[in-house]
Amino acid sequence: MTTFPYGYRGARLTLDQYMTISVIRRIDPEFRRRLFAMMQAAADVKVGLGIGGAWRSSTTQERLFRSRYEVDPLGPIRWNGQRWKHVRGAAAAPPGRSYHESTTEDGGCLAVDMVGNLAWMKANCKAYGLLEFTDLKEPWHVQPSDVPRGRSSYSDRYDPLPIWVLPTPTPPLAPSDPPLTRILRLGMEGRDVVGLQDLLRTNGYSAGNSDGKFGPRTDEQTRLFQRDHGLVADGIVNQAVWVALHAD
């Protein structure tokens, strides 16, 4: 029986078990069909790929936005009669502007956050009518490729998603592994730790000096990076973390 990653705590579920979860049932049916097909294709080539987060209520979206933004008179985002600037974590839209919220006429969402091998997903998602957001530093974010990129451009007048012709069962190709794949954790030292610290800094996470020592500061920033990118926030730098760090 095939199981797939679900959420951010290491759970694995069958697709039938996925459908018992309310936030998964709130995904637009055609969008969900494409996602499940891509997940199955990944599993067929021994690649783990699943859904971390899906539908959100407007209340949840507001809480997420407020946790990552603060009021600033010069901030670039207008919401609730004020300007806001991004101060921590990954970007998040204000409530009413996210595809994670109820979007379609029947209340379905048109965005999910994926977990697992995001590099494989990036290499293959177009074939499943899906769009990923590596270019916006959100390699986990996926939505249908046939809706506008931004929710503000979406209209209730849009027709339901068309049925996407899925690829034949020929296994998709997996991309090359990133150059740094050694598993790292607190207390380790070496060249790979220097590479980790440099990549964390490149991605906007201050891990202190690149001294090659995986100390408390590097551990803290690693966990923050994992949490922001939909990974298990355990401070262990495994293949999934390296993939996310090397994302374009």
Image (cartoon, helix red, strand yellow):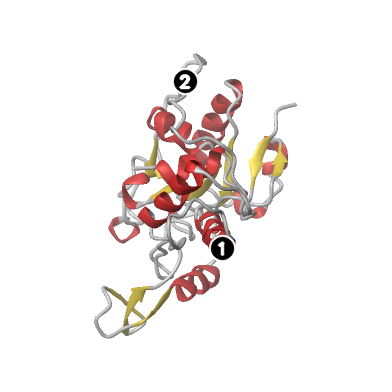
Residue type (three-letter) at the residue carrying disc 1: Glu
- Please, what secondary structure does the residue beneath circle 1 have? helix
Where is residue 117 shown, x and y percent of the image?
53, 36
Report how many numbered discs are placed on residues in the image.
Answer: 2
| Depicted 165 relative to depicted 56: above or below | above
Looking at the image, residue 225 lies above or below residue 170 = below
Give the residue number, with chain letter if any, for mark 2.
172
Nearer to the camera, 185 or 137? 185
**In this picture, residue 239 sits left or right of residue 246:** right
Residue 116 showing in the rendered view: no
Does 99 sit left or right of 213 as displayed? left
Residue at 52% of width from left, 16% of height from top? 169
Which of discs 2 and 1 lies nearer the camera? The answer is: 1
Q: From mark 2 to mark 1, how far is it between C-alphas?
A: 36 Å
Amino acid residing under circle 2: Pro
Judge whether 80 appears above or below 191 on screen: below
Answer with mark 2 or mark 1, whichever residue precedes in sequence: 2
Residue 27 on image: x %, y %: 54, 48
Q: Residue at x 30, y 49 (%)?
A: 148
Q: Circle 1 sits on which residue?
A: 220
Which is more toward the observer, 89 or 76?
A: 89
Looking at this view, is 99 or 84 the one in front? 84
